Image (cartoon, rainbow, N blue to C red):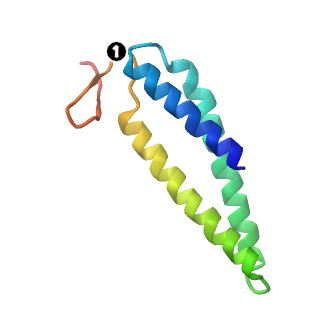
Amino acid sequence: MMIVALAGIALMAVAAWLGEVGKNNMMFFFPMAFMLCATITSLIITVKSKLAILGSASWGDWFQLIFAASMIILAIILIMESVKILPCPGWKKSKSYRIVLPE
């Protein structure tokens, strides 16, 4: 699960860097989105399975539940931030590092 999360983050970093230097970074968007969706789906399945056994859960199950829930929140924050700052060719950045679409 963590390798997939790292792959999504690595693809996001490469796409941001290529967009920053003015190169075409569109080829990274689909694999990046797929990796991040796979990670979030896996975390949601983990949370659902840990919630199902909540009554008889040991401390390890509680830890996995808290860790998976926090990873979901952090992944959503990461996606929201990347949408704001991920540059694409032909887009201009404003001074606040937000993408401004061409008119």
Q: Position of residue 46 (x, y in %)?
A: 72, 62
The image shows residue 63, relative to residue 82, as above or below, that is below
**Label 1 sits on what residue type?**
Gly
Indicate left or right for 5 with 79 as reference. Answer: right
In the image, taking residue 58 as reference, residue 88 lies left or right, namely left
In the picture, the quarter occupied by the C terminus is top left
Neighbours of disc 1 within 10 Å: few (<14), some (14-19), many (20+)? few
Vertical comparison of 64 with 84: above or below = below
User: x, y (%) of residue 7?
Assistant: 64, 37
Quadrant of res 21: top left
Q: Which residue lies at the image location 75% right of the left edge and 75% below the top edge?
A: 60
At a point 73% along the width and 81% down the height, the residue shown is: 59
Q: Is residue 37 above or below residue 22?
A: below
Count the marks: how many?
A: 1
Q: Position of residue 86 (x, y in %)?
A: 41, 31
| Residue at 71%, 53% in the rendered image | 42
**Kind of element beneath mark 1:** loop
x, y percent for residue 4: 69, 42
Using the rendered view, name the quadrant where residue 64 is placed. Answer: bottom right
The residue sitting at the left extreme is 95
Instruction: Find disc 1 in the rendering and name its residue.
Output: 90
Q: Nearer the viewer, residue 70 or 52?
A: 70
> In the image, is 84 to the left or to the right of 64?
left
Q: Residue at x 49, y 19 (%)?
A: 25
